[in-house]
Image: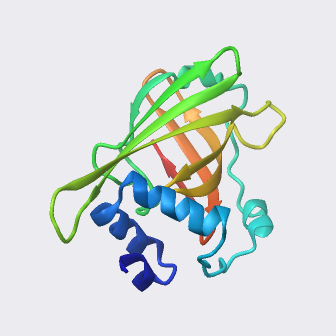
């Protein structure tokens, strides 16, 4: 019922997940929305190809993604829907066999109605892009049982600081942001 009232508003949907989210809801959404498509989702109001072609960030040249390994705290962000949760961390581990970055994202969403926080952990395998590709990393994943894809761009880095921009999309929304 909570999600039905959202009518495609991602902020509203995030609050529904904060209040009622659980693995059973994720599995139900995956089955009904993505697998079987028996629940329709309003079409996005964006052209995905055009979105990915405009205002492309410029990635840092010759960045060694293994420098990302370890736990990073998001201390600043651009997009309040994705980057500004309290105590949000990204933990990176480079897999030398698969040449992929294994990433764990932890986020806490404030529960506006019941108080406290809903904690969520998202894991994903990120493809390390070649130096000639426009992004540094490419991710396809699932959160709340629904698919997304993102291009990540390392814009600048030193031993203690990384600035990353991203563009992504899911069934309803195209989004971009950055975090450091």
Residue sitting nearer the eye, 35 or 147:
35
Give me the residue at 71% from left, 22% from top. 99
Q: Quadrant of residue 160?
A: top left
**On screen, residue 161 above or below 21:** above
Give me the residue at 28% from left, 49% from top. 86
Q: Quadrant of residue 168?
A: bottom right
Quarter placement of the N terminus? bottom left
Residue sitting nearer the eye, 146 or 155:
146
Q: Specify the color scheme.
A: rainbow
Q: Quadrant of residue 176?
A: bottom right
Residue reaching furthest right?
132
Tell me, yes or no, if residue 37 can be seen here.
yes
Query: Horizontal placement of 174 versus 135: left or right?
Result: left
Residue sitting nearer the eye, 72 or 63:
72
Quarter placement of the C terminus? top left
**On screen, residue 137 above or below 21:** above
Residue reaching furthest left?
115
**On screen, residue 98 above or below 103:** above
Tell me, yes or no, if residue 175 can be seen here.
no
Residue 35 position, x and y percent, is 66, 61
Residue 24 position, x and y percent, is 41, 56
Give me the residue at 31% from left, 64% from top. 20
Give me the residue at 57% from left, 29% from top. 102
Query: Horizontal placement of 128 versus 172: left or right?
Result: right
């Amino acid at each position: 019922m909570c999600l039905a009232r959202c009518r495609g508003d991602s902020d509203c949907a995030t609050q529904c997940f904060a209040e009622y989210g659980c693995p059973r809801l994720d599995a139900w959404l995956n089955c009904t929305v993505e697998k079987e498509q028996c629940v329709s989702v309003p079409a996005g109001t964006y052209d995905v190809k055009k979105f990915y072609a405009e205002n492309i960030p410029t990635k840092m040249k010759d960045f060694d993604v293994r420098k990302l390994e370890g736990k990073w705290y998001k201390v600043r962000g651009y997009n309040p829907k994705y980057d500004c949760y309290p105590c949000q961390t990204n933990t990176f581990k480079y897999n030398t066999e698969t040449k992929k970055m294994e990433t764990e994202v932890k986020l806490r969403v404030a529960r506006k109605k019941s108080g406290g926080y809903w904690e969520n952990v998202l894991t994903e395998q990120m493809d390390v892009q070649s130096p000639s590709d426009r992004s540094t990393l490419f991710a396809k994943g699932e959160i709340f049982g629904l698919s997304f894809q993102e291009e990540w761009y390392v814009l600048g880095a030193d031993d203690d600081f990384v600035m990353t921009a991203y563009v992504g999309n899911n069934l309803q929304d195209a989004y971009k942001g950055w975090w450091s």
